Amino acid sequence: MKTLVYFQPSSKNDNFEGARMRKTIKGALEVVDSKYTSNLYDDYDVAHFMSPDDENKLNIALERGVPVVVSALFGEDDPTTKFLIHKSKDGKRTNTLKSKALRVLNKANLVLVPTESAKEFLIENGVSKPIEVCLPGINLSRFNFSREDEKELFYRYFREDKNKKIVLAMGEYSFNMEGIHSLINVAIKRPDVGFYYIGCEALSSSVGKAKKIIKNSPKNMHFINILPDDIYRSLLLNADVFMLPGYSVAGIISVEEAMVAKCQLIVRKSAMFPDFLKNEKTAYVAEFSETLTSLCLDYLDEKIKPTTEEAYRKISLYNLENFGKQLLSLYESVIASNNK
């Protein structure tokens, strides 16, 4: 069996969630000694896509009679693998499927999602094709805590003080960057801590209130774009906290990597599907900005216990070998159904 693993982001997104998802799938297939290709016009038995923007490529695979698998809701912080639209009006916030995302998912033979609640969400939003829960595995060896040279990369790249604690947050550079004040308020109160906020969109494209928010933030608050993979991994290995301050659904790939790197997760409730993280067990989960700020301050002051070891134990079960075996089983099933 040979799999087409297709995802071609723009150069600026080469190190972000979609690209890391592609690397994870390829790595899992390599571990279980299964062939794959990235060439759309090669010979393959099943095609695996990750972006709603690849509808035309998906159509080519279907026209060739090849069954199609689509991974959805894994990289929602990456515009190229984003399936959802987050809307806010009159204090009400909703996440809905993009129209092209719904169309793509209903063309697939099989849809993969990270959690049961994500599956329920897709069904409620009109996806009628078979859906399976398949959480990506993580290459645990890429987060080697004994490699001091890897940890050192972050300090050399950012010229950061090694004595500082580090808080890393993920989100987007949107019109008013909803939820960002839960992070900025911690930075104001803890000038001795370094804060790094990563978004996929270019800072220069930030509009509206976002520019003012960034300009008026404290000096220890750093707004940055996508980093080279080794620098980002080094940042994770040095971060004490990984925070999701925004309201829109976040990318689960980034959260998995933070769990492997043993960062303390402090997450807004709406940023994750509810059955992935358990409050006070694998993360601290809160609904309101004031609570998120308080939790982060309390953790930095060692007033609450870390959940990092339990989070690591959970995510380490989802290694590349297990992920590869699950993918092969799903691929074989969809091929068999397609041949009937």
Image (cartoon, rainbow, N blue to C red):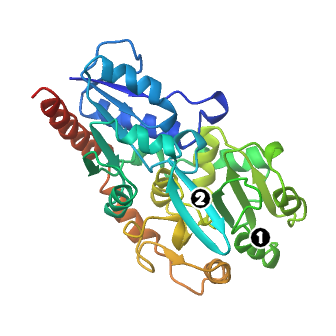
Q: Residue 220's spot in the image, x, y percent?
A: 82, 64
Type of the residue with mark 1: Ile
Q: Which residue is mark 1?
A: 184
Q: Is residue 122 above or below residue 25?
A: below
Query: Looking at the image, which residue is at 26% across and 23% down?
Result: 66
CA gap, disc 1 and disc 2: 22 Å
Q: Residue furthest bottom?
A: 303
Position of residue 90 in the picture relative to residue 211 (left or right): left
**What is the quadrant of the C terminus in the image?**
top left
Q: Which residue is mark 2?
A: 86
Q: Residue 259's spot in the image, x, y percent?
A: 46, 60
Q: Is residue 144 above or below residue 184?
A: above
Query: Looking at the image, which residue is at 86% across and 67% down?
Result: 218
**What is the quadrant of the N terminus in the image?**
top left
Q: Is residue 231 visible?
A: yes
Closest to the observer, 195 or 69: 69
Position of residue 43 in the picture relative to residue 146 (left or right): left
Q: Residue furthest left?
A: 340
Closest to the observer, 231 or 57: 57
Q: Earlier in the sequence, mark 1 or mark 2?
A: 2
Disc 1 to disc 2: CB gap under 8 Å: no
Query: Looking at the image, which residue is at 38% across and 71% down?
Result: 310
Query: Looking at the image, which residue is at 68% across and 74% down?
Result: 90
Q: Residue 83's spot in the image, x, y percent?
A: 50, 47
**Secondary structure under badge 1?**
helix
Position of residue 235 in the picture relative to residue 327 (left or right): right
